[in-house]
């Protein structure tokens, strides 16, 4: 019996040696199994509680837990200080830790352009973009304008006195406002507020003439007839569904391109990233989990309720998207004199 044990051990040694000699690597063992979380996971949202990023992170959390996609509990926290910089600095400090994920937006790479922050987007390991926010041009419900062309012509005739509301300054809403100006020759006084919801309130009160909110940020006022949607900055109309306003569903809103806009599309990605130096197998693990999330009914319900566009990108595709969008955005910021880095 002893000689048989020795023979088996000798044979396994020969196989392992041959594998190494042939460049095939060591024989797999239990210790080399696919990575998976071994302790509670933290999803860190780069915005305040109740905002779009918080809702995004919790939608992912719900789908993962409902379908047992990982074996560990998930905590969603929010660190929205410094326009989200707090989250990225916090996650950056967790070098190599696959249990902390930053949930954010394009601010991952745009914020370092306009603010002196202690991170840059190349510090992180990008995992995926999962969904894109659309942008709608909204006016007051009783405004005499019904399309992009009539509104921007009125703004142009007003000689720079029309006010455009948006969330924050030197961010997506103000960038889109500048693109509209370049497209039409109209000039707006851009008025930043703390959130898209606050911008919508200002529009219903008649304190501004328009805003560029995401759909969900104005949905309550649209349902009540207090604002109306002129167009969406997208290549295609949003999906059809139940009526939200008394007369329209999201899919009834024309694209701005249909109405003569030279801006074919303008969207904001919602992104997930890992800390610096996180092993590739961990990045791949989370990309796989997030891909499975997009196939769940919970995720489809999230997209319907928020009127966002589902589009999953990971790996080389996601990295290429970041590089291209960073270059496009940098050009606009440079023209506006916003760059600090």
Image (cartoon, rainbow, N blue to C red):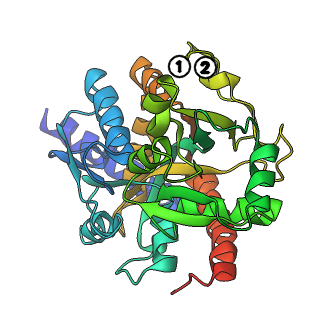
Q: Nearer the viewer, residue 102 or 289?
A: 102
Query: According to the image, label 2 marks what residue?
Result: 249
Image coordinates for residue 140, horizontal then vertical, percent: 57, 39
Image coordinates for residue 64, horizontal then vertical, percent: 31, 30
- For label 2, the crowd category at 10 Å Cα-Cα, with few meaning under 14, some 14 to 19 and many 20 or more, is some
Left or right relative to 37: residue 280 = right
Label whose residue precedes the other's in the sequence (2 or 1): 1
Would you say residue 291 is visible in this rendering? no
Query: According to the image, label 1 marks what residue?
Result: 244
Please give the name of the residue rendered at 17% of the width and 37% of the height, measured from the top-left corner: 73
Image coordinates for residue 327, horizontal then vertical, percent: 67, 71
Q: Which SS class for mark 1?
A: loop
Please give the name of the residue rendered at 39% of the width and 53% of the height, measured from the top-left corner: 195
Q: Which SS class for mark 2?
A: loop
Location of the N terminus by quadrant is top left
- For label 1, the crowd category at 10 Å Cα-Cα, with few meaning under 14, some 14 to 19 and many 20 or more, is some
Please give the name of the residue rendered at 58% of the width and 33% of the height, measured from the top-left corner: 141
The reply to whether the C-beta atoms of the residues labelled 2 and 1 are less than 8 Å apart is yes
Q: Nearer the viewer, residue 173 or 13?
A: 173
Left or right relative to 1: residue 169 = right
With respect to residue 203, does 334 lie above or below? below
Whole-number angstrom distance, CA of label 2 to CA of label 1: 5 Å
Image coordinates for residue 31, horizontal then vertical, percent: 24, 48
Q: Quadrant of residue 251?
A: top right
Would you say residue 83 is visible in this rendering? yes
């Amino acid at each position: 019996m002893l000689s048989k044990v020795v023979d088996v051990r000798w044979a396994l040694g020969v196989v392992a040696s041959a594998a190494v000699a042939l460049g095939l690597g060591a024989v797999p063992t239990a210790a080399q199994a696919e990575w998976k979380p071994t302790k509670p996971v933290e999803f860190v949202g780069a915005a305040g509680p109740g905002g779009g990023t918080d809702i995004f992170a919790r939608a992912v959390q719900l789908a993962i837990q409902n379908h047992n996609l990982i074996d560990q509990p998930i905590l969603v926290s929010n660190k929205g200080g410094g326009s989200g910089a707090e989250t990225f600095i916090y996650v950056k400090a967790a070098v190599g830790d696959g249990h902390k994920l930053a949930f954010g937006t394009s601010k991952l790479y745009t914020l370092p352009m306009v603010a002196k922050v202690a991170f840059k987007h190349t510090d992180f390991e990008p995992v995926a973009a999962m969904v894109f926010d659309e942008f709608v041009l909204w006016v007051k419900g009783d405004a005499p304008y019904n399309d992009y062309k009539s509104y921007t012509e009125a703004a142009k005739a007003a000689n720079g006195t029309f006010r455009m509301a948006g969330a924050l300054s030197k961010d997506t809403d103000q960038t889109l406002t500048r693109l509209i100006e370049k497209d039409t020759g109209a000039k707006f006084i851009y008025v930043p507020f703390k959130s898209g919801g606050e911008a919508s309130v200002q529009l219903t009160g008649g304190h501004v003439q328009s805003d560029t909110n995401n759909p969900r940020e104005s949905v309550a006022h649209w349902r009540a007839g207090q604002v109306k949607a002129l167009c969406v900055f997208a290549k295609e109309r949003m999906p059809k569904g139940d009526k939200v306003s008394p007369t329209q569903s999201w899919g009834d809103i024309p694209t701005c391109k249909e109405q003569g806009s030279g801006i074919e599309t303008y969207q904001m990605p919602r992104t997930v990233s890992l800390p610096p130096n996180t092993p590739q197998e961990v990045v791949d693990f989370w990309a796989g989990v997030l891909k499975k999330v997009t196939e769940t009914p919970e995720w489809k319900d999230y997209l319907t309720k928020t009127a966002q566009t589902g589009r999953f990108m990971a790996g080389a595709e996601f990295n290429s998207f970041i590089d291209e969008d960073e270059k496009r955005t940098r050009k606009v910021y440079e023209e506006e004199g916003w760059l600090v880095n």
